[in-house]
Amino acid sequence: MITPQPQPRSAAVPASAVIPTARRPYAAAFRALIALSAVTGVAIECVLGNPFVVLSFFTIWSNILVAVVLGRSAARAWTRRPPLPAVWTGGALLCISVVGLVFHLVLANPSSEFNQAVAIDALTGGKAVANQLLHTVTPIGVALDFLLLTRPGALRWRHAAQWLAAPFLYFAFALVRGALLSPGAPTRYTYPFIDVAELGYGEVLLNAVVLGAAFYVLGLAIVGLDRIRPATRLPGNRISPQRARGLK
């Protein structure tokens, strides 16, 4: 008598390997426009100013991150490839959201202790265009992409802590850069709330802790919103989230 051998269980096959990801031309076009907005703003600033100074601002870092992440996301949506890992798209959203919020609530706010409203209002021509692209158009575009063109449920609570690497890296860079530049150098410290020469290290470190906490809270808010927002109806084949059963 031959004992039947148990058949090995087949490995789970991702749904995307069975059902091809649909091309999403509208998402691709919108993301390409957002990336173009970020690239245009950075390019104008570099052409009209000193590139070494321009590239020292967190605003520029964040817009470059958006250009890379949204540019790759646009290509993936067009070529039927799976989306980028959520930790990257969520991180870009957090960084550019902080850029927009700090600009409008702190730097462009006449009632803020660190306001630069007079200098901002004096901008004209290409500088004014770049300012709007970097601080308003791109942040709004990334937020709309998150709310309207991405499926919910991909972000994790741990991402909020992982995203803190970006502001901490920038803070270290800004302090080292300021220490290496000679006193009186233009834009020695890129933002007034990290100006060690004016405030001292104690107050600057306190500002950094407050901003870091704000980053973390906003990151948690983004993750929480991602978990409660309704799913959008996206064109093409729609695959259920992992926690759902079967395919829709």
Image (spheres, rainbow, N blue to C red):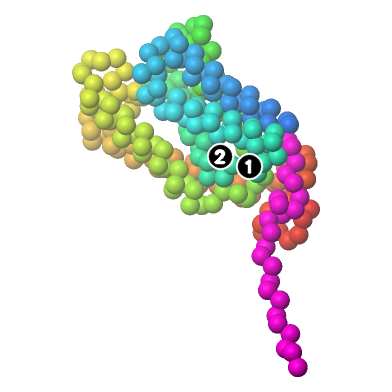
Quarter of the picture containing the N terminus is bottom right
Would you say residue 22 sits in the magenta stretch?
A: yes
The magenta stretch spans which residues?
A: 1-24
> Badge 1 is on which residue?
83
Tell me the number on the disc at residue 89. Answer: 2
Tell me the element at label 1. Answer: loop
**Magenta region, main secondary structure:** loop
Q: Is residue 63 above or below residue 54?
A: below
> Which numbered mark, 2 or 1, is in the foreground of this view?
1
Residue 245 shown left or right of residue 63 in the figure: right
Residue 237 shown left or right of residue 45 in the figure: right
Residue 43 shown left or right of residue 54 in the figure: right
Q: Looking at numbered disc 2 in the image, what kind of residue is underneath it? A: Thr
Q: CA distance from mark 2 to mark 1?
A: 9 Å
Q: Is residue 46 above or below residue 195?
A: above
Would you say residue 17 sits in the magenta stretch?
A: yes
Does the image show residue 105?
no
Tell me the element at label 2. Answer: helix
